[in-house]
Image (cartoon, rainbow, N blue to C red):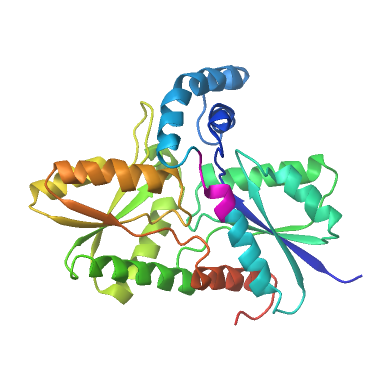
Amino acid sequence: MERKTGVLLLNMGGPETQADVRPFLYNLFSDRQIIRLGPAFLQQPLAALIAWRRAPKSMANYQKIGGGSPISAITARQAAALEQVLAAADGAFFVRPAMRYWHPFAAASLMEMAAAGVTELIALPLYPHYCRATSGSSFADLREQNQKLGLNLPVKEIRSWPDEPDYIVSLVRRIREGLAKFGGTAQVVYSAHSLPQKFIDEGDPYVEELRRTIAAVEQLTGQQGRLCFQSRSGPVKWLEPSTPDMLRQLSAEGCRNILMVPIAFVSDHIETLYEIDMLYKKMAHDLGMRLESTPGLNDDPQFISGLKNIVLSMAGQQPS
């Protein structure tokens, strides 16, 4: 029997319409790998309450970027582009998205893989940096659904890829294009999604891997940047400095131009299109600074080439 490899692009997913926002938030807060809401039996009732309370504000934010998240459409384009470049490689590859908190969920993608005659799987998270709340949660869900559906397909998990060469070059090109908007003079600020500090204290490699990416980028750009963390919520201690605190600090230092690089995100979504391009841009303006951002890598051919090389290495083939 010919071996046919399925590649699942693991991502968070996002609400595509206003009506999707509240159930999406419920799915998100139901995940105890992200946040533990009291004892396990209270997780889902508390998730429902939080989703109900947060939905109006979240809906308003999504409305500002077109009504919903573009991440499902972008991930579908990434999957199609990756399948196309893998088609030139030896062996058959079938590539599909598998979202954690919105459609298409892992179970549906697994069933599609089985129907296509896939004999083995490669799980490729679209998170370059490992974190138990992102890649870790997606891996756990994939394992559970694979077993629950009775498929028991063999799965190779790609844990992280913080310094994959084509990924780094794609970032560098965007940074150089961004700096050109300022005539080459701006403070580079790397903004990553925040995490509770306890994750790092308990051994999560997220920040260490972010620094690996930044070091690889700066080796090519020769430009030093500052790392900060966005999108924190809740009363626990989060990674510091926060992105708003970083903006205030840079303003106090006399900085006037900022190029913000969404270092932990490869696809445009609410954190880039609303938080960075609207919220932080306005905050910087109010502090007397100009802020521009680098666009998401999305389905950029060089970035897709990097994903291809990761898949081929995991499949035991020679990357081109």
Question: Range of the magenta residues?
Answer: 68-74
Residue beneath the point at 57% across and 29% down: 19
Residue beneath the point at 51% across and 43% down: 69
> Where residue 246 sits in the image (x, y, percent)?
21, 46
Q: Is residue 268 left or right of residue 240?
A: right
Residue beneath the point at 76% across and 49% down: 110
Considering only vertical position in the picture, is 163 above or below 253? Answer: below
> Where residue 205 sits in the image (x, y, percent)?
45, 52
Question: What is the total number of numbered labels drawn onto the structure image?
Answer: 0
Tell me, yes or no, if residue 158 can be seen here: no
Of the 4 image quadrants, the one containing the C terminus is: bottom right
Of residue 155 and residue 231, the one placed in the foreground of this image is 231
Tell me, yes or no, if residue 183 can be seen here: yes
Of residue 306 and residue 54, the one placed in the foreground of this image is 54
Of the 4 image quadrants, the one containing the N terminus is: bottom right
Q: Is residue 85 left or right of residue 180?
A: right
Q: Is residue 101 left or right of residue 35?
A: right
